[in-house]
């Protein structure tokens, strides 16, 4: 049998899987995590629920992949020309104020994925690790440029930035009048404020 046939089938399967992800991203953004059903996602791509689960292990696995898709989009859409990861996170926080369904999904999955057996456990763990590394490098770049305190611990600042982002999102889910972006920027300005090294 020609290798072209399996290759075409694989490409077709990947295209359908991506179509499902894009549809799920739109459904969750519109209705939120708890109000988005597998049936609604299946209807959006002309499949049955079983057809959707042919491409994903479970609804939880699908939701984890939706977050991957969201991260890939945000990484392209909100990265500044200079590649500064701290600016990118700030822009993402600002954007998240327009997509409550995805904020709800992210917050829910992060909590649920604490269990090692959860389909998103490795994704969340690895995502935090990559984000800490990226933000810490952003702090180092600012330190070299003289726009962040030279005595700051870049990894600690990275974790503070993530804690701010995640914590503000949780508060915002309860009170959407909260200016997440404004609070985030104010807090990061305070954290990054250049100050002389501590006396030894």
Image: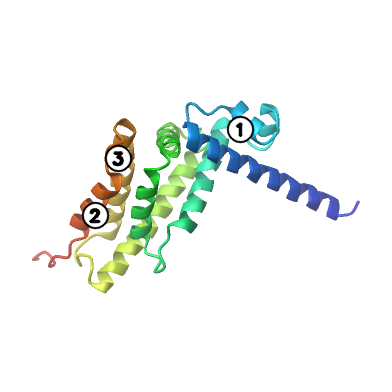
Q: Within the image, what quadrant is residue 125 found in?
A: top left
Relative to 171, say whether 140 is above or below. Answer: below
Name the N-terminal-most of marks 2 and 3.
Answer: 3
Residue 41 badge: 1
Q: How many marks?
A: 3
> Distance of mark 1 from mark 3, alpha carbons?
29 Å
Position in image of residue 17 (x %, y %)? 66, 43
**Residue corresponding to mark 3:** 167
Labelled pair 1, 3 in contact (Cβ < 8 Å) = no
Position in image of residue 54 (x %, y %)? 69, 34
> Distance of mark 2 from mark 3, alpha carbons?
14 Å
Position in image of residue 144 (x %, y %)? 27, 72
Name the N-terminal-most of marks 2 and 1.
Answer: 1
Residue drawn at x 43%, y 38% as measured from the top left: 106
Q: Quick one: label 3, few (<14), some, or many (20+) residues within 10 Å?
A: few
Residue drawn at x 43%, y 54% as measured from the top left: 130
Q: Is residue 81 left or right of residue 165?
A: right
Residue drawn at x 26%, y 55% as measured from the top left: 157
Where disc 3 sits, the SS reads: helix
What is the residue that sits farthest to the bottom in this orientation? 145
């Amino acid at each position: 049998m020609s290798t072209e046939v399996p290759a075409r089938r694989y490409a077709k399967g990947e295209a359908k899987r991506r179509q499902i992800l894009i549809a799920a991203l739109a459904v969750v953004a519109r209705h939120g995590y708890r109000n988005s059903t597998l049936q609604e996602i299946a209807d959006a791509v002309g499949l049955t629920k079983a057809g959707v689960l042919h491409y994903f292990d479970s609804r939880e696995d699908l939701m984890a992949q939706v977050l991957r898709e969201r991260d890939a989009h945000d990484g392209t859409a909100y990265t500044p020309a200079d590649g500064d990861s701290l600016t990118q996170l700030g822009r993402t926080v600002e954007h998240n104020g327009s997509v409550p369904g995805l904020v709800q999904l992210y917050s829910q999955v992060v909590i649920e994925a604490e269990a090692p057996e959860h389909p998103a456990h490795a994704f969340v763990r690895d995502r935090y690790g990559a984000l800490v590394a990226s933000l810490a490098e952003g702090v180092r770049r600012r330190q070299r440029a003289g726009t962040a305190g030279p005595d700051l611990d870049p990894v600690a600042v990275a974790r503070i930035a993530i804690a701010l982002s995640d914590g503000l999102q949780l508060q915002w889910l309860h009170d959407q009048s909260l200016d997440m972006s404004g609070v985030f920027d104010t807090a990061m300005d305070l954290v990054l404020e250049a100050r002389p090294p501590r006396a030894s």
